[in-house]
């Protein structure tokens, strides 16, 4: 996809996520790999009101080439690109139900959600939880690197999800699936819900 289409796609998906309440105010950020570097949303920008020309273009080292000042969350995007195989896009949101799951004391940091639906298994797989760091802290990137690329889906404690995908569309769809499964998990918490069996999960992966 050429740069013009990539820019338009970031703005279109950003508005869709914002309009549906999956991120609010100036929270959340999106990046897409392009050439040797990537295009990312600017700092203090609302995903609901992005303009293609304001998007930040970074080189492979994360240095600004053109556009507005990039999001302060560049370290977490860089960590995903550096460690996750075939990562072509990264979406980071502050979606309510996903954040709520990150607050629960019983959440397993190696697998935050049970396999409640087929689409969660197919689009997300498993999600890791990493400890809290303040937004923009380079230590978030270090924590993601510590996962060694084993997860495309990461939940930042008391903060929000980070999703890698081969394409922006794939990353957005997986983020939406994570949020919906988080909602289901909270709705059925303590009710002993039926989850997919290992055999059903294996069939989906096959």
Image (cartoon, rainbow, N blue to C red):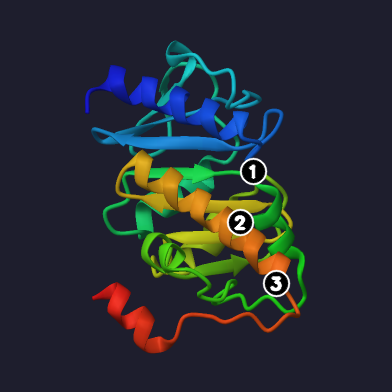
Q: Which mark is residue 166?
A: none
Q: Which residue occupies 77% across, 75% down?
A: 105
Q: CA distance from mark 2 to mark 3?
A: 33 Å
Q: Viewer-nearest of labels 2 and 3?
A: 3
Taking the image as shown, residue 134 lies to the left or right of residue 108, namely right
Which quarter of the image is occupied by the C terminus? bottom left
Q: Report the front residue among 133 and 22.
A: 22
Q: Residue at x 29, y 79 (%)?
A: 203
- Describe residue 57's horizontal placement relative to residue 177 as left or right: left
Residue at label 2? 139
Mark 3 highlights which residue? 188
Badge 1 marks a residue whose secondary structure is: loop
Element under disc 2: helix
Give the spatial CA distance, label 3 vs label 1.
33 Å
The 10 Å Cα crowd at callout 3, few under 14, some 14 to 19, many 20 or more, is few
CA distance for labels 1 and 2:
8 Å
Q: Nearer the viewer, residue 40 or 48?
A: 48
Q: Is residue 133 above or below residue 19?
A: below
Pointer 1: what residue? 136
Pick whichever of labels 3 and 1 is earlier in the sequence. 1
Question: Is 53 placed above or below 74 here?
Answer: above
> Is 78 left, or right, of 2 in this rendering?
right
Residue 185 lies, in percent from the top left, at 65, 68
């Amino acid at each position: 996809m050429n740069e013009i289409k990539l820019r338009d796609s970031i703005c279109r998906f950003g508005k869709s996520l914002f309009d549906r309440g999956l991120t609010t105010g100036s929270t959340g950020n999106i990046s897409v790999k392009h050439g040797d570097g990537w295009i990312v949303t600017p700092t203090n920008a609302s995903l609901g009101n992005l303009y293609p020309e304001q998007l930040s273009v970074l080189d492979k080292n994360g240095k600004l080439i053109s556009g507005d000042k990039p999001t302060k969350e560049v370290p977490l995007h860089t960590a995903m690109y550096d460690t996750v195989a075939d990562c072509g896009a990264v979406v980071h949101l502050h979606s309510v139900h996903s954040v709520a799951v990150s607050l629960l004391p019983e959440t397993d940091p190696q697998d935050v959600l049970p396999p409640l639906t087929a689409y969660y298994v197919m689009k997300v797989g498993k999600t890791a939880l990493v400890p809290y760091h303040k937004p923009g802290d380079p230590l978030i990137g270090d924590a993601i690197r510590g996962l060694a690329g084993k997860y495309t889906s990461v939940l930042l404690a008391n903060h929000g999800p980070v999703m890698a995908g081969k394409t922006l569309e794939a990353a957005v769809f997986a983020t939406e699936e994570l949020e919906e499964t988080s909602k289901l998990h909270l709705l059925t918490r303590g009710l002993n819900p039926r989850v997919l069996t290992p055999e059903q999960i294996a069939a989906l992966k096959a």
